[in-house]
């Protein structure tokens, strides 16, 4: 089978698995906009997304909805519109970045963390919101008002409870297996709490889709490098949204998430420099003072050249 060019791979990917437009804008905000100061002019976003098949109208609609949902804030200068990451949304972008760009492999100390909301302790709206936020962080609902995870980030848990105004209203505790009472082994709780088959299948699909890029030569245009990098992170982020990010000791072996991360790391490292050329060119058309990528950008995936 003849090797695909970068342009052919991009066209095939967009045809077979077209990304949702608003979600693609979110990916771009986290991957490309945040390192360059966290703000963009609407014209720049339109130019960046045009090669990915997103029309002017769809960009405007997507950005407008992200403003309504509290992810972006808008301002105007004459007839031009400028957008910036909403300060209160920054912790959520930072959490997403840690998930995407950091190597998987949490250590398990034998404990499970539980968030307990007994009946009557919080109202239905807060219960639903808290469940949604905790599930995004990988928690499983074991029973009504009982959420659990074997290795959550305490800082993230604190931030979620504060932002949802659930702090002081729910119980948070750690538990270990009680020996000598005939308990099932605590690691078996993973099988009861999560069905990981969908996550495994999604990681395999990601690997199948992006492995051909390793055979591309290094002469990729800045625009194609940007498109590949954006689609890579968009697809990887989409899989990770459903991955509870459990410690490797509790996962089936071999775990495809580790291979998916290694692949994403390779493709990102190969495309990031040329992609940055394109990003700076597009952002610079509307704002010549656009700063280069910050230091944190070069720490992604264990370090970028």
Image: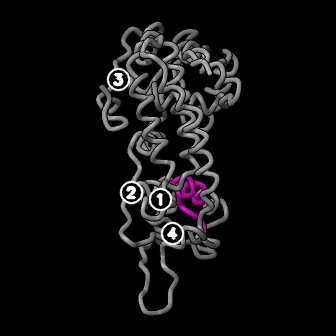
Q: What is the magenta range? A: 130-141
Question: Label 1 belongs to which residue?
Answer: 246
Disc 3 packing (10 Å; few <14; some 14–19; many ≥20): some
Number of the front mark, 2 or 4: 2
Q: Earlier in the sequence, mark 1 or mark 2?
A: 2
Q: Residue at 64% across / 72% down in the picture?
A: 144
**Relative image position of residue 60 (x, y in whole percent):** 65, 21
Residue 40, compared with residue 118, is above or below; it is above
Helix, strand or loop at disc 2? loop
Q: Earlier in the sequence, mark 3 or mark 4?
A: 4
| Quarter occupied by the C terminus | top left
Question: Label 2 belongs to which residue?
Answer: 106
Question: Label 4 belongs to which residue?
Answer: 115
Q: Earlier in the sequence, mark 3 or mark 2?
A: 2
As drawn, is 261 to the left or to the right of 139?
Answer: left
**Relative image position of residue 100 (x, y in whole percent):** 45, 41
């Amino acid at each position: 089978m003849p090797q695909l060019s970068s342009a052919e791979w991009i066209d095939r990917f967009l045809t077979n698995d077209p990304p949702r437009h608003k979600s693609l804008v979110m990916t771009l905000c986290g991957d490309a906009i945040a390192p360059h100061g966290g703000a963009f002019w609407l014209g720049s976003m339109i130019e960046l997304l045009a090669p990915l098949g997103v029309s002017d109208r769809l960009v405007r609609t997507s950005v407008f909805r992200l403003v309504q949902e509290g992810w972006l804030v808008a301002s105007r200068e004459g007839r031009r519109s400028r957008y910036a990451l909403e300060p209160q949304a920054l912790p959520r972008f930072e959490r997403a970045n840690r998930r995407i760009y950091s190597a998987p492999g949490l250590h398990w100390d034998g404990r499970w963390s539980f968030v307990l909301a007994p009946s009557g302790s919080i109202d239905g709206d807060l219960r639903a919101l808290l469940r949604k936020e905790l599930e995004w962080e990988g928690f499983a609902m074991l029973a009504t008002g009982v959420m659990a995870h074997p290795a959550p980030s305490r800082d993230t848990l604190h931030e979620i409870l504060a932002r949802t105004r659930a702090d002081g209203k729910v119980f948070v505790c750690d538990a270990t297996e009680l020996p000598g009472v005939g308990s099932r082994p605590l690691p078996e709780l993973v099988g009861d709490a999560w069905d990981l088959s969908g996550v495994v299948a999604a990681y395999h699909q990601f690997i199948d889709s992006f492995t051909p890029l390793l055979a591309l030569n290094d002469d990729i245009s800045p625009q194609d490098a940007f498109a590949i990098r954006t689609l890579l992170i968009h697809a990887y982020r989409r899989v990770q949204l459903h991955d509870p990010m459990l410690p490797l000791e509790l996962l089936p072996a071999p775990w495809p998430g580790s291979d998916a991360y290694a692949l994403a790391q390779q493709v990102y490292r190969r495309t990031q420099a040329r992609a940055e050329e394109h990003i700076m060119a597009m952002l610079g058309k509307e704002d010549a003072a656009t700063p280069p990528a910050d230091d944190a950008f070069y720490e992604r995936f264990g370090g970028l050249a």
